[in-house]
Amino acid sequence: MLLIQNATVMDPRSGFEGVCDILIEGDKISEMGRNLALPAGNCQVIDAGGLVAAPGLVDVHVHFREPGFTEKEDISTGAAAAARGGFTSVVLMANTKPPVDNEETVRYVLERGSGTGIHVYTCANVTVGMKGKELVDMEGLAEAGAVGFTDDGIPLLDGELVRRAMERAAVRDMPLSFHEEDPALIENNGINRGKASEYFGLGGSPREAEIRLVERDVRLARETGAEILIQHISAKESVELVRRARETYPDIHAEATPHHFTLTEDALIRYGTLAKMNPPLREEADRQAILAGLADGVIDIIATDHAPHTAQEKARPLTEAPSGIIGLETALSLGVTELVERGVLTMMELIRKMSLNPAKLYRLNAGYLAKGGPADLVLIDREAVSVVGDFASKASNSPFTGWELKGKVTATVCGGQVVYRA
C-alpha cells in the first residue's frame, strides 16, 4: 500500500482541485479524501505537502528507436526518461527497423515495454514498409495490440490512400496521426524557409509544405468520419485550418511540442543541429499562433516528439545531421515555465493537455485521479527551479541543456509503484 498525504490534487476529468490524501492498494486508487487514516499493515507514506498530485502524464508521440536503432535509445532507457519526466503512459511511433507494419513487431514492442515499470503502447504503420503505397492489415495489427496508426517521419502523399486509411480506421474507431510535410516543396528539411534558411544559405522548408497536407487531411477526416491528430503543428495557417475545422467537426485534434511553443527559428541559428527538427522551428508569429491555439483549446494535446540521436549524428553538418530532439524530461517544466508562469494556461489546463486529452484520443484508461481508477500519478513541485541536464535518456540532443526551468517532478507512481523519485 501507498499513502500520499497532503497533496494538492488536480484531476482534469472531474475538475477537482484541492488538498487531500490518496490511498493506493495494488494498482488502483482505493480512497481519496482529507486526513485518511494510516491503514494497518505495511504501508509506504509520502508527505506531499506543497506538491501537486496530477494524473500520470501521457505522451502520444515518442520514439524509443527499438527495434533497429538502439544506439540512440531503447525501450528501457526511453521508459526511464519518461518516468523521470512524470509520464506513466507513452505511445511509440512506428518508424523503427523493421517498422511496426506486422503483428510480430507489435508484439515484440509491447513485450519489451511490459517490463519497464510504465505503460508502453505502440502505434502501427499506416502503410507497408512506410512506403506510402499499400495499406497495412489494420484489423490484424489492432488485434495484436496497436492503439493507432501513423507513418510519422514520412508524410503520406497519396490522397486516395489516405482516404481509404481513414475509412478503415473510422470503422475500428481508432485514431490516425499525421506528419504533415510535403517533400516536393522542401529543399533542406529541419530549416525554416525564411530567416534561418537565409542565414545558412540553404533552401529550407516552407510553411506551405505543412499547410498543403493539413488542408487535405482535415477535409478528408470530415468526409470519412475519421478521428485524426495533426502532429507537431508548426505554422500559424495550420492552426487556423484546425480551428475552422473543429467548429463543426471536433474529431480533428492537434498537438504542439514544447519546442514549438517555446522556440523560433532563431534557436536554430543559436544552437545549430540541436534545434533542427521536422517540421522546423518557424517565426515568432507562428509561435504566438500556437500559444493562442493552446489557450483557446484548438490545440488540445501537448506531446514531446521525443527523438533521440547520438552525439556523433548531431555533430554532423547541419544539412546532414538528423532532425529531432529529446523531450520527455523537459516537457513538464517547459509547460510550467512557458505556459503556466506566463498565463497562457492554468496548471489544470496544462495537466489536461498532457494527460486526459491524449489518453482520450487513444482510448487509454489514464489521465484522471479517482477512487477505483488507475494508480498512475505524478507529484510536482511547481516552485522548484532546476537546471536542465543529466538525462536518463541515452541521448542528450536538446537545445534546453543548461536552461533554468520552473516545475520539477519529485515522484512518479505507475501501477501503484514508485518508478521515479527525485
Image (cartoon, rainbow, N blue to C red):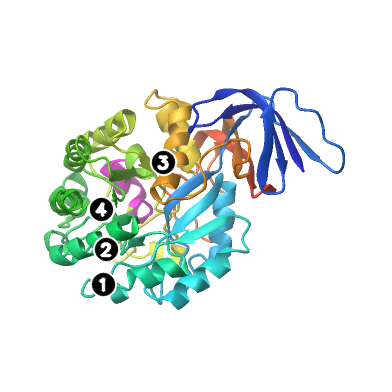
Which amino acid does the dot numbered 2 rest on? Arg
Q: Earlier in the sequence, mark 1 or mark 2?
A: 1
User: Residues under labels 4 and 3: Cα distance?
Assistant: 17 Å
The tag on residue 168 is: 2
Which amino acid does the dot numbered 3 rest on? Asn
Q: What quarter of the picture does the C terminus occupy?
A: top right
The tag on residue 357 is: 3
Q: Earlier in the sequence, mark 4 or mark 1?
A: 1
Q: Give the number of the mark in front: 2 or 3.
A: 2
Q: SS at mark 4?
A: loop
Residue indicated by mark 4: 226
User: Residues under labels 2 and 4: Cα distance?
Assistant: 9 Å
Say if mark 2 contacts mark 3, CB within 8 Å: no
Left or right: residue 400 compared with residue 101: right
Say if mark 1 contacts mark 2, CB within 8 Å: yes
Which amino acid does the dot numbered 1 rest on? Leu
Residue at 59% of width from left, 63% of height from top? 114
Task: Point out residue 3 in the picture as x, y percentages from the top left corner.
Answer: 74, 36
> Can residue 68 be seen here?
no
Residue at 66% of width from left, 40% of height from top? 29
Q: Earlier in the sequence, mark 4 or mark 3?
A: 4
The tag on residue 135 is: 1
Which amino acid does the dot numbered 4 rest on? Ala
Looking at the rendering, the stretch of residues picked out in magenta corresponds to 263-275
Q: Earlier in the sequence, mark 2 or mark 4?
A: 2
The question of residue 264 being in magenta is answered with yes
